Amino acid sequence: MRESLINLAYLVASVLFILCLRGLSSPEQGRRGILLGELGMLIAVVATLFKAEIVSFEWIIAGAILGSLIGTAISLKIPMTQMPERIALSHAFGGLATSLVGIAEFHRMRDMADAAATVVAVAASEHALNRLTMGSLGFEVFLGSLTFTGSLMAFGKLQGFITGAPVTWKGQNVMNFAAFAGVIGLLVYQVIFLTAAPQWMFFTMCAVGFSLGVLAVLPIGGADMPVVISLLNSYAGLAACATGFALRSNILIISGALDGSSGLLLSILMSKAMNRSFANVLFGAFGTGGGAAAALPVGQAAKGYNEATVEDAAAVLTASQSVIVVPGYGMAVSQAQHAVRDLATALEKRGTEVKYAIHPVAGRMPGHMNVLLAEANISYDALFDLEMINDDFARTDAVIVVGANDVVNPGAKTDAASPIFGMPVFNVEQARSVIVLKRSMNTGFSGVDNELFYMPNTMMVLGDAKKTLISLFGAVKGDGH
């Protein structure tokens, strides 16, 4: 009866996980989806605590309290701008936990098999490792180890502890492929010979996984870190799924498969949004992490850019009947979403139509801008993705670019030598006037300069985006209308 109730709880939790993913497919249902996922995880954890294998709760309670305190402290301290780093850390610890569980289970099964072999052959056949379990444990510790160090590397690159520029060397891909092939060979040998295989093979797979996590992420530039994090999420899910097969846990198999498949699909969609293939992301060494101003084409260098004041920008906005706001990572850094809303509200009171253009990878992770704008109570009806709004720019009086860079670079459409060539971008340059709010003229994550900043219909208002928006709001509101 106990097992039946536990399995029923796992079924309910699995359905809630699926509904969670379904809810996350749209901003309107995202919050509800998160709540369903949390409820499903609570049910799964509580049901697991009733399994007969658990005979003591002291360490479980201690771990739950400690983990809850650490998780709460981290979540309260880390702002929305650093959510990619927060996710990378979560993946890292999830991968480490999976790997440790696999190592512990391997030891337990080997000890049981050795003990049973000293009694009778029948008992040995019952407790010895079978090939499915051995294969599952091997994938579990390898993928878990790779996810741990790979996610830590991604966190370091995003946080700036490690250079965001690609670190490459001759023969690196050949070396990584050889290491991966070696792990497959060791795993196949252990699956075939089971307990006859020496234990050092198992721990060698684990060590290679830790090493590959570092070596595989080092050559990838900061611009591609969001895709890498999503891909590592997929690895973590597959590792959890393998853990389910090893432990004969249906809930781990289902949730791991959902995590692995959704992470893979998200990685594919993000790569598509940047017009890049998986192979290009993993081996293309794209992205410098940004920061330095790139060398300009001769014509642009001679022309310079049009630096404007807040008053200049306010005059353009008050004369506009239609405005599109393009938010980017700079808006997130300055926490300017509320100031954006206030300015938009002031413009709408004047009869101006205000829309928001949301790029799939703006803010270094999908949905980042949607969450920030929703935090400021901006209606979802005003948010439009690239395909829905790109044709509107040519009919728009003014565009406000708030901290966005690569996603509004027209060079992605015309410069075949550019590393972002072919990446879908907004047609911002087609608007009558473009107001760019940016801290400086430094480049974005791609490390290439933006042609938009030097066009005749663009005015650059340099400085902190939040302060500039507050000044713009005051200027527009105090216009007397």
Image (spheres, grey):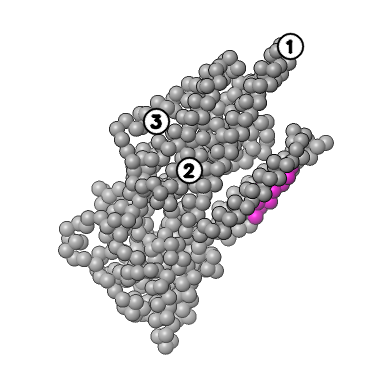
Is the magenta region chiefly helix, strand or loop? helix
Sequence order check, earlier mark of 1 and 2: 1
Residue occupying the far right of the picture:
1
Mark 3 and mark 1: Cα distance apart in space: 44 Å
Of residues 276 and 142, the one drawn nearer to the viewer in this rendering: 142
Sequence order check, earlier mark of 3 and 1: 1
Give the residue at x 44% y 45%.
Answer: 154
Q: Quadrant of the N terminus?
A: top right
Residue occupying the far bottom of the picture:
480
Give the residue at x 43% y 57%.
Answer: 362
| Amino acid type for the residue under numbered disc 2 | Ser
The label shown at residue 176 is 3
Tell me where residue 312 appears, x and y as whole percent: 31, 78
Mark 3 and mark 2: Cα distance apart in space: 17 Å
Instruction: Reply yes or no: does residue 45 show up in magenta.
Output: yes
Position of residue 199 in the picture relative to residue 129 (left or right):
left
Q: The magenta stretch spans which residues?
A: 35-47
Mark 1 and mark 2: Cα distance apart in space: 45 Å
Tell me where residue 245 appears, x and y as whole percent: 63, 30
The label shown at residue 151 is 2
Element at label 1:
loop
The label shown at residue 120 is 1
175 up-or-down from 258: above or below: above
